[in-house]
Image (tube, coloured by chain):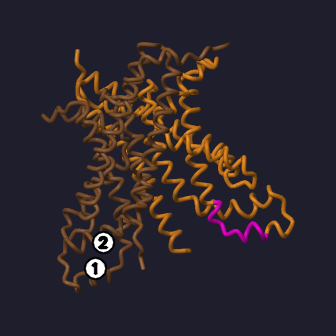
Amino acid sequence: MIRQFGLPEALAILSGVQATILLSLIAFAGGGIVGLAVALMRTSEKTWLQRCAAFYIDFFQGTPLLMQLFLVFYGLPVLGYKVNPWVAVAIGFTLHASAFLGEIWRGSIQAVPRGQSEAAYALGLSYASRMRNVVLPQAMRISVAPTVGFMVQLIKGTSLAAIIGFVELSRSAQIIASATYKPLLAYGCAGIVYFVLCFPLSRLSMRLEKRFAVKT
Amino acid sequence: MTYHFDFSVLLPYWEQLLRGCWLTILLSAISIAAGLVIGILTALAKQSRFAAARVAAGTYVEIIRNTPFLVQVFFIFFGLPALGVSFQPWSAAVLALSLNCGAFSAEVIRGGIDAIARGQYEAGTALGLKPLQVFRYIVLKPALRIIFPALSGQFVLTLLTTSIVSSISAEELTSIAQSIDTLTFRSFEIYIVATILYLTMSFGFATVFKLVDRLYFSYPVK
């Protein structure tokens, strides 16, 4: 029996948006914490720390997100960790986001004039206080626009979780598409929902970028 | 627990993996070339005198940039046949990738064209160049030179995006890896190998683009 495509079906697709948003938020929060560590390592004075962080970033920026998800999804059980799909997907996206955020924030930290951290050093501030009170607050302002831009990329990226069977917006569209034989409508709907999520963020990122460009 | 890695079961499949790499490179190269043309045309349309062209170009770019590639490729491959347009998986993949690459390149290229000073156009016209010549020699080449690093980053991203077309069973490295996975049940090993192959390819692409930059865009400016 082929289902009709009506309001219930549209709502079923829409219900997937919850998982999409939640997954994006988890990835952003987790990626933010690990990413800060990556950025600090990348800008540290120790060469070996720099190299490790550079390798980490190059790896995640040089391989497809889909492969990264496959590696986590098939790799964790092999290494002896039986985890549910939520955990696997969350770990995959956290690692992915941390590399990209790390690279964005490295750029922002390096964009803060050197004199700032030198002055803080001359005042006798410790590394932690130099970073926390002098460099990072200024770097944060610089990084807001590209960070918001990356959030758009991350939200779109979560659609790949559908390929490993995780039910979010794209997967629910897929399910409805095969139940109703109306793929045009189903994927159209999903596309519109993604657009509604991403477009305001894209615009915000552009506005922030312009505002910052004027000030410098 | 102890897991014994066994990469040797993959050895008989080396030819298929190599074929996958070749198909991925081919798919990327075609989509990047088409995407570059689409990107240049879109960037031009965005500056057009005709409002309709500007709106059309802007809508295209925003729709592609704010929806996931997976949904775009599903829409083209599964959705469009309802309107009487159907594709083979590979053609659908090329179409989706080209449109995707085109929209992202358009934004980058527009930035480059904006960076060319107004006086340059006027100087070109004053020298008696035709509009197309002005565009080609005075606008496009210097603009591409300025944005080439950003553009090549975009192209490497297109290479990585090709892995997603495995979901419509277009044949390339990821789909071949998936089929080897179902034959050998060595998921972790096969995806480690595929990941290393992707890493090598994206590194190779980046190197080629750097070479192009050095050979084609390294003329002295002043």
Please identify the dominant SS of the magenta region.
helix
Numbered disc total:
2
Residue at point 36%, 40% (across, down): B69
| Quadrant assignment for the N terminus of chain A | top left
Q: Amino acid at mark 2?
A: Val
B210 lies above or below B188: below
Look at 31% across and 43% down and name the residue there.
Answer: B97
Find the residue positioned furthest to the bottom: B126
Q: Are marks 1 and 2 in contact (CB under 8 Å)?
A: yes
**The image quarter in which residue B125 lies:** bottom left
Rendered position, B99 above or below B195: below
Output the letter for the chain in orange.
Answer: A
Q: Secondary structure at mark 2?
A: helix
Residue labelled with disc 1: B121
User: In the depicted view, which residue is nearer to us: A19 or B181?
Assistant: B181
Secondary element type, mark 1: helix
Residue in the image at 28% along x and 44% along y: B30
Q: Position of residue B212 (x, y in %)?
A: 39, 57
Q: Residues within 10 Å of mark 2 (few under 14, many from 20)?
A: many
* Residue occupying the point 58% across, 27% down: A87
Which chain is brown in the picture? B
CA–CA distance between discs 1 and 2?
8 Å
Residue that lies at the very extreme toward the right in this rendered image: A124
Q: Which mark is residue B139?
A: 2
Sequence-wise, which precedes: disc 1 or disc 2? 1
Task: Please state which of residues B167 and B52 is positioned toward the viewer in this rendering.
Answer: B167
Task: Report the front residue among A203 and B64.
Answer: B64
